[in-house]
Image (cartoon, helix red, strand yellow):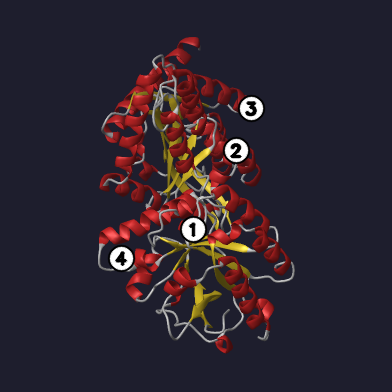
Amino acid sequence: MLSDYYFQFQPRYINGEISCYEALLRTTEFDTEYYIDNNVVDHVEFDLAIIDYVIKQRAQLIHSENIKLAINISIASLLDDKFIKSCLSIFEHEENIILELTRHDATKDVLGIQEAIKELKSKGVQLALDDYGKGYANSELFLHLDVDYIKLDRKIIKNIDQSYIAYSLVKTTYEKIVKVLGKNIIVEGVETFEQLNLLKQLGCMTYQGFYFSRPLNIDQIKPTKNKENFKKKSVNSFCNSLDQAIYEMNRAPNPKAIKKAINNLIKIDCYNIIGISPNFYDVYSEQSRINKNYNELLERKTSSHFLLVSSLISTCNALVIIRDYDGNAIYNNENHINYLGVDLVDYSVEQTLERFPDYRTCLDLDKELLNSDTCFIVSNETVENDSGKQSFHTYRQKIVHFNQAFVICSVYEQNDDIAVDNLTGCFQKNYLESTYALAYKTLVFIDLDGFKLINDAYGHNKGDEVLRDFAKNIKAMLRDSDAMVRFGGDEFVVLLDSVSIRAVKQRIETIRANLEAYFWAQGLNLSFSYGIVSIEDNITVALDKADQEMYKQKNGRKNQLQEII
């Protein structure tokens, strides 16, 4: 039957290596495809003869077991019992074979073909839908078969380097096959570097064509790459799941079914990105609103402004992380991932705390912000790593999206001239000249009472010990988001994000009472006077006002003491 034909073998490449050879039937007298379509009467016998012939040719080669071959057969042959029985017998002992299904219009029996595919795959045979895009009417019908590959016909890619419309068609096809159906793509007819470069931008696929190699004779083929390391397909990605849920909602036949579909959509869209109303009454109006929001979201997704913002956040110099109310990381940018060495989106809160125990402080600060009336707090943090201590400025902002609260954290490495006082561990005075100080709402100016007597009576070493003790204890009673500055000598400044002077006064009074008790237990009579003011636009003005308030209090306390005496 094959006496007038011979075979050549077209290499296929993935990641620069040959993954397979397609067995191409050739004749010197006729156009092979035309002859097969018009002169072969029994395609089952013809296909079995080809499979037998190609496998026997491979057997003559050294390392034949490591050579993967693709063999074209008519899709209708899968409906023949004799063909399937013969194949099951052949592939009981033969491996590394792909059967490529051609002549799509020869049948419409999808269920019968799918059952045959299932049987063949049980023997390790891989299958490909060949000639997609060639013009067969049934190609779309067979696109959902459980095949391993979809092979794009050369017609689809022929003009992609000449026409954006042609390129867009290939891109759309790739998205559909790889990201929706989850199948691998083989693209044939790659003849130029320009075509290859454009195809590579779409993602991972297998290539064949004259750009790589012309068909080879049997004695020229070599062992193929054993495994094709395709990237994991995102068939079940959030975008696909959301799109499918919208589809289910729109095809629902009645209000009850629509409501059920919307409730399922709420489960998928757990952060309510498309703004589903929590208490809707009219399912049709809610369905219409969801579609409108979804379409607007898709339009914004491709806008230049949206893409710019996405790029800014993902590649900016800050470490950016966004957490929900429960502390789950829903986004962290490249800098954050690179710094920690992990993507926290993939971790639960418990897993994150197990790996990074200090992460609890971050979550506590989030809760503090989420449960407060303010929408912004600043904290200064020091991290111990292999290279020593590393200081960061962290800005937290609370945002509410469709009644759900989130915290956006932007973390910057401290690379300015701000330094920490070696004695007390507080920021030095120049911190008050930085832009960080303006992020706070309230300033407290503190001056120690009784420190000079202690210093004179016990010496400067004891005085230094008292200053260290004072700073350590007062910082322990402040929040992590507060900042403490050694203004000079025994004067300190505390910066807080609270806008309530009354609440700050209550905190400072409590802190003073605790410190007095702490030092009294050591036989030391130490306290402090303070002045509290709101920070508006000028730290210098706030410092002057707080200093005046502090001296008023100090003089008042002296007068009270004299009256007691």
Mark 1 and mark 2: Cα distance apart in space: 56 Å
Is 558 situated left or right of 71 in this image? Answer: left
The quarter of the picture where the N terminus appears is bottom right
Amino acid carrying label 2: it is Val
Disc 3 packing (10 Å; few <14; some 14–19; many ≥20)? few
Real-space Cα separation, disc 1 to disc 3, in angstroms? 101 Å
Which residue position holds label 4?
Answer: 160
Residue 86 appears left or right of 4: right
Neighbor class of circle 1 (other Cα within 10 Å; few <14, some 14-19, many 20+) is few
Question: Which disc is residue 523 wearing?
Answer: 3
Compare residues 196 and 495 and report the one nearer the observer: 196
| Labelled pair 4, 1 in contact (Cβ < 8 Å) | no
Percent x, y of residue 16: 49, 75
Alpha carbon of mark 4 to alpha carbon of mark 2: how far?
47 Å
Whether 505 is drawn above or below 195: the answer is: above
Q: Where residue 492 appears, x then y in whole percent?
A: 43, 34
Q: Does 200 sit above or below residue 35?
A: above
Disc 1 residue type? Ala
Identify the residue position indicated by label 1 in the image.
Answer: 106
Residue denoted by label 2 = 349
Query: Which of the 4 quarters of the picture holds residue 287?
Result: top left
**Mark 3 or mark 2, which has the lower sequence index?**
2
Q: Residue at point 58% right, 23% down? A: 514
Q: Which mark is residue 67?
A: none
Is 335 placed left or right of 146 in the picture? Answer: left
Please name which of the two marks, 4 or 2, marks the residue nearer to the observer.
Answer: 4
Which quadrant of the view contains residue 293?
Answer: top left
Please report whichever mark, 4 or 2, sits nearer to the chain's N-terminal start: 4
* Residue at position x 47%, y 51% in the image: 179
- Dot 2 lies on which element? helix
